[in-house]
Amino acid sequence: MADDCDLAVIGGGSGGLALAQRAAAHGARVVLYEPGRLGGTCVHLGCVPKKAMWLAAQAAEQLGLAADLGFRLDAGGLDWPAFLARRQAYVERAEAGYARRLAGLGVTVVAERAHLLPQRRVASASGVRSARHVAIATGGRPRRLAVPGFELGRVSDDVFALTQPPRRVVVVGGGYVAVEMASLLAALGGEVELLVRGRRLLDGFDEGIGEALATAMRGRGIVVSTGVEVTAVERAADGTRTVSCAGGARRTGVDWLLWAIGRVPNSEDIGLADIGLSTTASGHIAVDAQQRTTVDGVYALGDVGTQPALTPVAVAAGRRLADRLFGGQPEACFDPAQVPTVVFALPPVASCGLSEAQARDRHGDGAVSVHATRFQPMREALAGRDDPVWIKLVCVGQAQRVVGLHLVGPGVEEILQGFAVAMRMGATRADFQATVAIHPGSAEEVVLL
């Protein structure tokens, strides 16, 4: 019997949408299953609303800078209802845009929960469809812990339901989401403490990043406490929370507690066992470089898989998979080397390639050279602020090929992209130094290192 479609995609987030759209553009018959809203976490509970809040928080910082530079301001605080309306309108435009593109490409959207069946069949409330290929792109969700009183806190999804800034905030965690949310809530009026179980922020990034970011966050009034493990949460008589930690320390009078302790994949209850597909210990679906799972004709991408949990990674992987399956490009696959990434904290973090420790482990101490600097940007210096930019360049070999670039400070979120292109092309430190610097500015410090 003929297949009902060429490709069935389960999940309408960034990866699933990118795959479905590119496959349909190549002429494939595509069915996309999404019981929720098109756009997934990124559009509704992640990148997009987070970046909107970051822009508002950044504007709040810039108002302070403007005053320090000599402007006479009486701007007042953020009009939260007006801001939230603008943010929601942006989100709805993005979602509507996805729906229009899918319709224009002839993609069939099934707004129902899907369940995998053997022989590349997919079941939903409206029936069973068979496909030549099936892709799982169901994303992830915030991790929860079996800590007494966990339910008295909130997770990252709940940040976007806030209608006003909480006063006394405790954020538990030290990764992407934790440092981003702590920064935003502090800049928008909260009194924030960050409780980190490990010894530094952003474990997994270059060690210097965590140190530079912690210093900058403390300079903004955020309390960063490392080596702290939360053991219980209780509600006090006045309605606030009391957070108990290992060793007996307590935080009292907490108005809002945010658990930002990582994410887990949405791999349960979608029929993986029914098709003989197992997961890793963390619940992720293992994939190879071409997004293939252990079951023939079944693929996985995005946060449910084992590649970096970043929206641009999911998009790139989805497009390359479509190119390979339907675009006549049999060798197309996502290349995970030197993925640039930005953490939208205040100040932001930008990183591409290997950390110093990774480079030494891979190439040996003798082959690695490191060049770092810390400098004060002109705007912050004029305003009399101590808010430096930190830069580290990691190079290998006699030619000093650049394998890692790491930055913390104002403006670095826009600096990294062009340098990431150069790194993929094999640029050396000499190539950087031969490039005429744009003066005065922060990016010039990279080519002057």
Image (cartoon, rainbow, N blue to C red):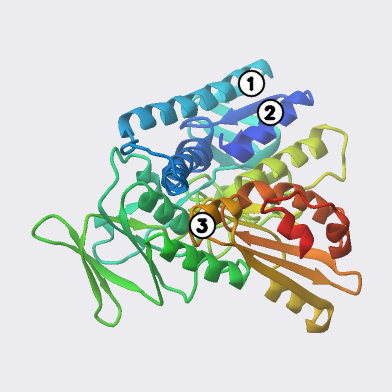
Residue lying furthest top: 104
Q: Quadrant of residue 226?
A: bottom left
Identify the amino acid type marked 1. Answer: Arg
Residue 185, image x, y percentages = 37, 50
The residue singled out by tag 1 in the image is 101
**191 or 134: nearer the viewer:** 191
Disc 3 element: helix
Residue 17, image x, y percentages = 62, 33
The answer to whether residue 135 is above or below residue 145 is above
> How far is the residue under mark 2 from the one under mark 1?
8 Å
Q: Earlier in the sequence, mark 2 or mark 1?
A: 2
Q: Residue at x 17, y 57 (%)?
A: 240
Disc 1 element: helix
Are the residues at dot 2 and dot 1 in contact (C-beta closer than 8 Å)? yes
Q: Earlier in the sequence, mark 2 or mark 3?
A: 2
Left or right of 400, for residue 319: left
Disc on res. 21? 2
The residue singled out by tag 3 in the image is 176
Are the residues at dot 1 and dot 3 in contact (C-beta closer than 8 Å)? no
Q: Residue at x 61, y 66 (%)?
A: 205
> How far is the residue under mark 2 from the one under mark 3?
29 Å
Identify the amino acid type marked 2. Answer: Gln
Are the residues at dot 2 and dot 3 in contact (C-beta closer than 8 Å)? no
Residue 162, image x, y percentages = 31, 41
Residue lying furthest right: 399
Residue 119 in sight in this render: no
**425 or 136: nearer the viewer:** 425
Identify the amino acid type marked 3. Answer: Tyr
For the C terminus, the image quarter is bottom right
